[in-house]
């Protein structure tokens, strides 16, 4: 199994509070991703990173920011959490070189509830 | 606008028979397609992939077929086993980007 951990695994927070989710990898993979999974939507890309300090937006990036100051860590921040951000969040990694670039390895997920 | 669609939310199959999971897409700029399996309370696990320049890829019991003219791909599992019971997601990679679009998933139940 790829070495990917996410913390916290579960979190309940109140509307309007800031929240940071952490993804940590031990694989030294270049690419890292944040997804959210919601019923009826599958997995949707929030942000991704293609290197230290190099990030870009996915399809549902509004209300989220990310940072990557080290290869192994990719942080997802909800500046002011809203109930619509209640979801399960997954981090994923992938490595360079076809086809390996296309094979993403996912972390165990973080269940976030915003009340 | 759902660019990757899995129109069957669920599928039940007898153990030992073939499972066929389907996926349709709308964007001609997808260059790679993947299938993932997901168990409850776990992250998705990569299963198999196919490049847009191919029409078939096999890996053990799993085969993915790509029909570019119909913008359709399918995953065949033969023979199906109870441990295959999970949610299956298809995903597509947009050429020239690192962006992936996932379908909504199909829940497969293999009956013993």
Image: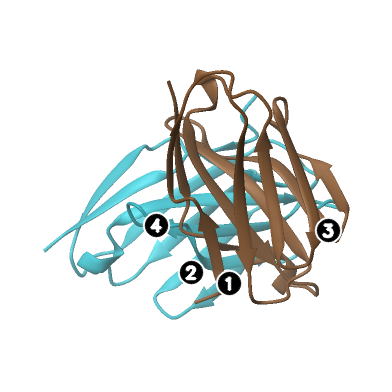
Q: Chain of mark 1?
A: B
Q: Chain of mark 3?
A: A
Point out the image quarter for the N terminus of chain B: top right
Q: Is residue A103 left or right of residue B30?
A: left
Mark pair 2, 4: CA separation: 23 Å
Looking at the rendered image, the disc whose residue lies closer to the viewer, 1 or 3, is: 3
How many C-alpha atoms fall within 10 Å of the one at disc 3: few (<14), some, or many (≥20)?
many
Disc 2 and disc 4 in contact, CB within 8 angstroms: no
Q: Which residue position is annotated with label 3?
A: A50
Q: Chain of mark 4?
A: B
- Marks 1 & 3 on one chain: no
Q: Is residue A91 left or right of residue A69?
A: left
Above or below residue A93? Residue A13 is above
Disc 1 and disc 2 in contact, CB within 8 angstroms: yes
Q: Secondary structure at mark 1?
A: strand
Q: Position of residue A73 (x, y in %)?
A: 70, 61
Q: Colour of chain B?
A: cyan
In the rendered image, the residue lying farthest to the bottom is: B60
Q: Which residue position is annotated with label 1?
A: B57
Of the numbered discs 1 and 2, the one sitting upstream in the chain is 1
Mark pair 1, 2: CA separation: 6 Å
Mark pair 2, 3: CA separation: 30 Å
Q: Position of residue A60 (x, y in %)?
A: 68, 30
Indicate which disc residue B63 carries. Answer: 2
Specify the chain shown as brown: A
Of the numbered discs 2 and 4, the one sitting upstream in the chain is 4
- Marks 1 & 2 on one chain: yes
- Marks 2 & 4 on one chain: yes
Q: Which residue position is annotated with label 4?
A: B42
């Amino acid at each position: 199994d790829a070495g990917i951990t996410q913390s916290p695994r579960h979190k309940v927070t109140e509307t309007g509070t800031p929240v940071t989710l952490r993804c940590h990898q031990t694989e030294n993979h270049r690419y890292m991703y944040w997804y959210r999974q919601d019923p009826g939507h599958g997995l949707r890309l929030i942000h991704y990173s293609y290197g230290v300090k190099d990030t870009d937006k996915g399809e549902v990036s509004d209300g989220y920011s990310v940072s990557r100051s080290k290869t192994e860590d990719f942080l997802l921040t909800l500046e002011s959490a809203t109930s619509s951000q209640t979801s399960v969040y997954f981090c994923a990694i992938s490595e360079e070189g076809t086809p390996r670039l296309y094979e993403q390895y996912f972390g165990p997920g973080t269940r976030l509830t915003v009340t | 606008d759902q660019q990757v669609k899995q129109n069957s939310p669920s599928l039940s199959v007898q153990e030992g028979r073939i499972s066929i999971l389907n996926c349709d897409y709308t964007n001609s700029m997808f260059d790679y397609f993947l299938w993932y399996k997901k168990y409850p309370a776990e992250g998705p696990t990569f299963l198999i992939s196919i490049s847009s320049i191919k029409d078939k890829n096999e890996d053990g019991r799993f085969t993915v077929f790509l029909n570019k003219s119909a913008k359709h791909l399918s995953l065949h599992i033969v023979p199906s086993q109870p441990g295959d019971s999970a949610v299956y997601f298809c995903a597509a990679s947009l050429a020239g980007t690192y962006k992936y679009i996932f379908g909504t998933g199909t829940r497969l139940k293999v009956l013993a």
